[in-house]
Amino acid sequence: MRIRQLFLAGLAGLLAFGVGGTGVARADAYPGPGVVTGSTNVHDPSMIKRPTGGYLLAHTGDGITLKTSSDRTAFADAGKAFPNGTSWANAYTNNGANLWAPDISYRNGKYWMYYSASTFGSSKSAIFLATSTTGASGSWTHVGRVIESTTSSNWNAIDPNLTVTSGGEWWLTFGSFWSGIKMVKLNPGTGLRADATLYNIAERSVNSKSVEAPVIHYRNGYYYLFMSFDFCCQGASSTYRTMVARSTSITGPYRDRAGTYTTAGGGTEILASHDAIHGPGHPSVFADTDADVLVYHYYNSSGTAKLGINLLGWDSSAWPYVY
């Protein structure tokens, strides 16, 4: 049944683009999230497929909340990455336990997790790295601080995403509001920052400069930059939407379907509020055996943040659509 639902949603996505059309999807044609059950209250999710099978999901919460699934449908709570607190992050959270927007991956025989520490509306923020051989609650080892921003910075060190190129280079993309999305190079051996260069990837001048939550996904010669425009964290009034642009170089420049650079506000919308799905955003993308998978959060009509999972299709011009 779920396969049939996803197939029909994919067909709707193709029809929304139209044969020979402009490639701008209609919001009323966006598909609903695929069926998920169990523990599905999430915010800022990141999910990967485990090398041993099944899935591991991490999301914003006290000590970073973990969930597991055997089938990408039924999810169960799996504790906290840091059940004993994160004293090293307290200077950025006003001693709070809530940590934001983890990015999880599996490389070189272990799990890597980048996550951010901040308070709402502040650019006094930091991104940290932890590793684990199992991914289980309490097994994560603090590696160090990767990068920080201050109240005088014109950028914000939150919402990290690790990308490893086919040539073995490690890059961290991050950013929220202020002057937008940034990127730094990492040392593949340590996972920490490799040099002092800060790349400018995307920026907006409208809607309070609202662009954040970047994730880069490589496919067939292009680096695809997925990101969120507009406003999160307002329950059913959230206006978050998921955008995409692409480049043949990891450091850009990135352009949307119309050719607009992301540094000039460019981005092609692929998912936005529709029906009872409000503010779908903070994307995570990974390749699975059946398709590329888009993971995100949205708000239901009661204002609860929920897990959204859809698949990504690719049109004849190599642009993604959601089904």
Image: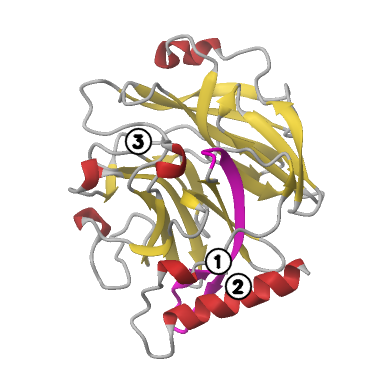
Q: Quadrant of the N terminus?
A: bottom right
> Alpha-carbon distance for marks 2 and 1?
6 Å
Secondary structure of residue under mark 1: loop
Label 2 packing within 10 angstroms: few (<14), some (14-19), many (20+)? many
> Alpha-carbon distance for marks 1 and 3?
42 Å
Asked which quadrant contains residue 56, the reply is top right
Q: Badge 3 is on which residue?
A: 195
Secondary structure of residue under mark 3: loop
Closer-to-camera residue (167/257)? 257
* Residue 238 on image: x %, y %: 40, 44
* Residue 226 on image: x %, y %: 43, 56
Label 3 packing within 10 angstroms: few (<14), some (14-19), many (20+)? few
Q: Is residue 185 left or right of residue 98?
A: left
| Residue 321 within the segment the image draws in magenta | yes
The answer to the question of whether label 1 and label 3 lie on touching residues, with beta carbons closer than 8 A, is no
Closer-to-camera residue (118/196)? 118
Three-letter amino acid code at the position of disc 2: Ala
* Residue 87 on image: x %, y %: 54, 10
Tell me where the magenta segment starts and ends, as one range. Answer: 302-322
What's the residue at 35%, 35% (across, down)? 195
Q: Badge 1 is on which residue?
A: 31
